[in-house]
Image (cartoon, helix red, strand yellow):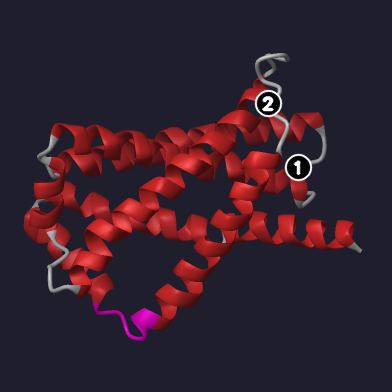
């Protein structure tokens, strides 16, 4: 019975990591990338997202609750998993270890980012180009955002590989190898989008 429950939790954890959290990550990166078009371009895109109908309901059930479950169960997995990358230096073992490390980094970043933006907005601050420009004018915060955004993207991309395996989409070694190249390509492409967006605010 406990084994069936853990199997269900792991499947749900994997599914939520791709849908809806993964889709939200991509959407968030795309909106932020509008900053490369200038202040007005970003503010217009951010304002559109800010004024979506039923935004609070959408954020609660499509973003916050899935992230909360994914984070809590992800921490359980991270601190109970047997990492053997130092003993067996195989590529997938390192990916396994990095998935756990980037998961913890991403969680710390999400909490901090929500505090800097959503919580401050609740106190009357305006989430716009100038807010991000002020945050990233600090060199420490600039590097913090770069490291954390790249970690979050890696966690999504490598998690997508795991999702395909655990859900029986990629079963053969060849399909898993192809999936590795595809997901690492996604990681590189989204990292470029994310980093360009960050530097657009500097």
Q: Quadrant of the image for the C terminus?
A: top left
Q: Residues within 10 Å of mark 2 (few under 14, many from 20)?
A: few
Earlier in the chain: of badge 1 and badge 2, it is: 2
Residue at the farthest bottom position:
54
- Is residue 88 found inside the magenta-colored segment of the image? no
Expressed as whole percent of the image width and height from the top left, the position of residue 32 reads: 25, 53
The residue carrying mark 1 is 170
Q: Residue at x 45, y 49 (%)?
A: 107
Q: Residue at x 60, y 45 (%)?
A: 160
Q: Residues within 10 Å of mark 1 (few under 14, many from 20)?
A: some
In magenta, the rendered stretch is 51-56
Which secondary structure, mark 2? helix
- The circle on residue 92 is 2
- Is residue 54 found inside the magenta-colored segment of the image? yes
Q: Residue at x 64, y 40 (%)?
A: 79
Depth check, front residue: 63 or 25: 63
Depth check, front residue: 181 or 160: 160
Residue 186 visible: no
In the image, taking residue 45 as reference, residue 105 lies left or right, namely right
Which secondary structure, mark 1? loop
Q: Where, by quadrant of the figure, is residue 180 drawn?
A: top right
Expressed as whole percent of the image width and height from the top left, the position of residue 184 reads: 53, 32
Q: Quadrant of the image for the N terminus?
A: bottom right
Mark nearest the camera among 1 and 2 is 2
């Amino acid at each position: 019975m406990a084994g069936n429950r853990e199997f269900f939790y792991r499947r749900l954890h994997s599914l939520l990591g791709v849908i809806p959290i993964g889709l939200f990550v991509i959407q968030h990166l795309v909106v932020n990338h509008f900053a490369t078009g200038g202040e007005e371009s970003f503010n217009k895109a951010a304002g559109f997202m800010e004024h979506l109908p039923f935004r609070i309901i959408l954020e609660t059930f499509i973003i916050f609750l899935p992230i909360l479950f994914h984070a809590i169960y992800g921490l359980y997995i991270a601190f109970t998993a047997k990492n053997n990358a130092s003993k067996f230096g195989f590529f997938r073992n390192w990916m396994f270890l990095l998935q756990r490390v980037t998961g913890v980094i991403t969680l710390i970043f999400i909490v901090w980012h929500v505090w800097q933006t959503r919580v401050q907005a609740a106190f009357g601050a305006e989430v716009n180009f100038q807010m991000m420009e002020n945050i990233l004018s600090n060199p420490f915060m600039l590097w913090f955002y770069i490291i954390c955004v790249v970690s979050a993207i890696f966690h999504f991309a490598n998690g997508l590989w795991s999702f395909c395996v655990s859900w029986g989409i990629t079963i053969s070694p060849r399909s898993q190898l192809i999936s590795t190249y595809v997901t690492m390509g996604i990681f590189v492409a989204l990292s470029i989008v994310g980093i360009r967006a960050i530097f657009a605010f500097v």
